[in-house]
Image: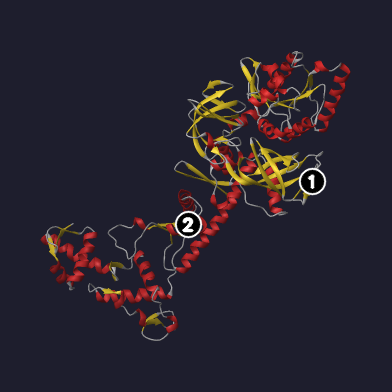
């Protein structure tokens, strides 16, 4: 059997506490003031034997108007409400207000308990019963049973118990809602905090969703401070866990009483969003005497939270009794809420209930009023199913991608359910999944197209600026532009996927053999559009021609770039290349030369030696062959021998030996000027 939570409601002094005493034998008036005055000012709790060893929790809520905010705290998580009405007085103002609040909060199961029947005759009782049925009908509550009892004499109590068991069994047979609540991330709104000597901080509340286990780490929202569950009591008994529907007391370590209060929520870290701006569907009670205008200041109640707020109406200038609309509530303090949470609004002054509604979005930015896109989005979020909402949130996350914890926090679903929903969207081709080190990042198909276009635009812009480069450095791509908001792991996975999909080509500069010295530090990978090749422009052909002709002529008398007459070279009128003067408008620019030489290196057309000294690979291969021949014959070679072999200076001979050392042809043994076979 599922865990069943029963609440009481009704006007002051109509016998709610006495009724619970008659049902359970327990007294829920625990505060000295309550004992002295004979009224309930705070929430009281007891448990009720349902049979077969199962128990239901009972919450005794205050009836006095002054304590309505405590009544809304108790209503959170109620499965059944006993609406207590004194037979000698009938329905009173607070009876109606309690009924309004409970229906706003989504409670639909009521039993009207006509108490103190020993104080009225049959004719009067029939008249009060008729009044109750009329009031219930006007509130949309049809076929609510009315049970006559006397808490003082015990008459009718057994009949009420049987009816409660019937509701509990019916709720047990409809397990879909219970399964959903149980699978959701744990959430316990705190309604009472105290310190017990020898134990420390104790927080109590009714488990709304999920389950909490002994030893579990929790966060105290909205502040987010961490704590650990040292012990759990359910209905006064030590337990290893508590779950949805149960009344629980948690002994917490790592947190002081001053750090937790009524209105806080205990939940796993990262499972809730906090903030001061929420978007809601707002309903004004049909019999309210107040009109809610834009920017009205109101009292906000949800779960055990109570605070002031302002209502910014998004689709109307005002809401009259019986009307509904979308609104943004600007809360005066942070709140930990979730989509689907219900709330109650009371007028600022005089303090009276005017309506309530349901939370659609939490922790949002302030919206412009009458904006079509905003209203359409809220309408969709109000009516959509879980899968539609998952896709919608995926679209909203855009290029930042969505992770499973973010979806569980937004929708209040388990990680398993979130995984299934996102997995189905991926199977349907509506989303892409990128798995990195155990974490999964999801990207909507439409967002991927936009991200891909933006990324390609950035790469092409870079290559336009540096036309002689093979691609854009990956590190530069990650730190700015389209990918900057993504975690590096997700960005790496995405670019890798684009390479597999032949959208990008990847050149691993770090894979170049270390013996090949380059004129720049490789530092990772280069990315370019698939099939991209640098344009061999007229400037490229000029530099290549001037360099290759000069380097071939110089042989092992290596020239630096400063020795080459690039500044005196130009293009002729034809597409060919020549050296000489004239044609200044076609002359190669000085800052183009290093870029072109860098490209020639990667293409294997130039070999970097040191500083700004380059040669042709064929020149160095010629020198290496000469050196290898001497090594085979003599077993060693000196710098002086190299000078004679290739007719060059000691400086150039040293550069040649450094190259053969890197290539493994030679190696130093003893003297700095000698080499042996590598």
Residue positioned most to the right: 123
Secondary element at image label 1: loop
Residue at figure coordinates x 32%, y 74% from the top left: 547
Residue at figure coordinates x 76%, y 15% from the top left: 156
Whichever of labels 2 and 1 marks the residue nearer the N terminus, that label is 1
Separation of residues labelled 2 and 1 (CA atoms): 60 Å
Instruction: For the N terminus, give its image quadrant.
Output: top right
Secondary element at image label 2: strand
Q: Position of residue 308 (x, y in %)?
A: 67, 44
Q: Label for residue 14?
A: none
Direction from residue 190 to residue 311 in the image, left or right: right
Residue 664, can we see it?
yes
Instruction: Identify the residue position indicated by label 2 in the image.
Output: 504
Instruction: For the C terminus, give its image quadrant.
Output: bottom left
Q: Is residue 355 above or below residue 191?
A: below
Pick the front one: 361 or 603: 361
Direction from residue 417 to residue 69 in the image, left or right: right
Front of the two marks 2 and 1: 1
Are there few (<14), some (14-19), or many (20+) residues within 10 Å of tag 2? many
Are there few (<14), some (14-19), or many (20+) residues within 10 Å of tag 1? some
Residue positioned most to the front: 36
Residue 183 picture quarter: top right
Q: Position of residue 96 (x, y in %)?
A: 79, 32
Instruction: Identify the residue position indicated by label 1 in the image.
Output: 291
Residue 313, can we see it?
no
Pick the front one: 141 or 176: 141
Residue positioned most to the bottom: 582
Q: Position of residue 53 (x, y in %)?
A: 61, 15
Q: Is residue 595 above or below residue 513?
A: below
Q: Is residue 412 above or below residue 6?
A: below
Residue 56 picture quarter: top right
Residue at figure coordinates x 46%, y 56% from the top left: 478
């Amino acid at each position: 059997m599922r865990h069943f939570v029963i609440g009481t409601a009704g006007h002051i002094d109509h016998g709610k506490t006495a009724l619970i005493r008659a049902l359970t034998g327990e007294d829920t008036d625990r505060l000295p003031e309550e004992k002295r005055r004979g009224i309930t000012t705070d929430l009281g709790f007891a448990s009720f034997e349902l049979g077969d060893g199962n128990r239901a929790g009972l919450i005794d809520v205050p009836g006095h108007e002054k304590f309505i905010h405590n009544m809304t705290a108790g209503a959170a998580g109620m499965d059944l409400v006993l609406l207590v009405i004194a037979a000698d007085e009938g329905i009173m103002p607070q009876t109606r207000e309690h009924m309004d609040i409970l229906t706003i909060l989504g409670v639909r199961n009521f039993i009207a308990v006509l108490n103190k029947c020993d104080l009225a005759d049959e004719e009067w009782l029939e008249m009060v019963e008729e009044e109750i049925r009329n009031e219930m009908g006007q509130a949309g509550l049809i076929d609510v049973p009315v049970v006559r009892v006397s808490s003082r004499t015990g008459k009718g109590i057994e009949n009420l118990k049987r009816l409660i068991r019937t509701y509990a069994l019916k709720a047990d047979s409809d397990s879909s809602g219970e399964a959903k609540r149980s699978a959701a991330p744990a959430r316990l709104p705190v309604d009472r905090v105290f310190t017990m000597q020898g134990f420390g901080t104790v927080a109590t509340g009714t488990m709304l969703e999920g389950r909490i286990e002994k030893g579990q780490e929790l966060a105290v929202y909205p502040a987010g401070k961490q704590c650990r569950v040292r012990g759990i009591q359910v209905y006064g008994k030590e337990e290893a866990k508590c779950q949805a529907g149960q009344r629980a007391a948690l002994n917490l370590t790592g947190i002081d009483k001053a750090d937790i209060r009524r209105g806080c929520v205990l939940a796993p870290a990262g499972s809730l969003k906090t903030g001061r701006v929420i978007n809601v569907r707002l309903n004004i009670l049909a019999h309210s005497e107040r009109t809610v205008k834009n920017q009205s200041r109101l009292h906000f109640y949800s779960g055990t939270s109570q605070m002031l707020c302002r209502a910014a109406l998004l689709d109307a200038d005002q809401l009259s009794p019986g009307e509904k609309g979308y609104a943004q509530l600007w809360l005066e303090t942070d709140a930990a809420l979730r989509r689907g949470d219900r709330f109650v609004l009371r007028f600022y002054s005089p303090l009276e209930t005017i309506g309530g509604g349901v939370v659609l979005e939490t922790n949002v930015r302030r919206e412009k009023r009458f904006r079509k896109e905003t209203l359409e989005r809220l309408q969709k979020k109000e009516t959509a199913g879980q899968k539609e909402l998952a896709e919608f949130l995926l679209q909203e996350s855009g290029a930042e991608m969505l992770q499973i914890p973010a979806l569980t926090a937004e929708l209040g679903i388990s990680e398993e359910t979130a995984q299934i929903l996102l997995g189905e969207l991926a199977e349907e081709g509506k989303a892409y999944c990128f798995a990195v080190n155990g974490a999964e990042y999801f990207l909507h198909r439409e967002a991927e197209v936009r991200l891909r276009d933006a990324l390609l635009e950035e790469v092409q812009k870079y290559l336009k600026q540096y036309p002689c480069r093979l691609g854009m450095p990956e590190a530069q791509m990650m730190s700015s532009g389209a990918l900057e908001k993504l975690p590096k792991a997700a960005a790496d996975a995405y670019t890798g996927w684009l390479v597999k999909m032949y959208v990008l080509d990847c050149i691993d500069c770090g894979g170049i053999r270390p013996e090949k010295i380059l004129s720049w530090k490789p530092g990772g990978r280069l990315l370019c559009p698939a099939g991209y090749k640098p344009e061999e422009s007229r400037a490229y052909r000029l530099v290549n021609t001037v360099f290759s002709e000069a380097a071939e002529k110089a042989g092992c008398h290596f020239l630096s770039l400063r020795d080459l007459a690039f500044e005196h070279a130009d293009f002729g009128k034809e597409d060919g290349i020549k050296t000489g003067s004239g044609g200044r408008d076609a002359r190669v620019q000085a800052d183009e030369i290093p870029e072109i030489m860098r490209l020639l290196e990667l293409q294997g057309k130039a070999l970097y030696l040191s500083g700004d000294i380059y040669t042709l690979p064929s020149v160095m291969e010629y020198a290496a062959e000469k050196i290898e021949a001497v090594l085979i014959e003599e077993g060693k070679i000196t710098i002086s021998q190299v000078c004679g072999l290739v007719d060059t200076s000691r400086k150039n001979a040293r550069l040649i030996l450094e190259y053969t050392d890197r290539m493994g042809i030679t190696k130093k043994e003893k003297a700095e000027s000698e080499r042996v076979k590598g």
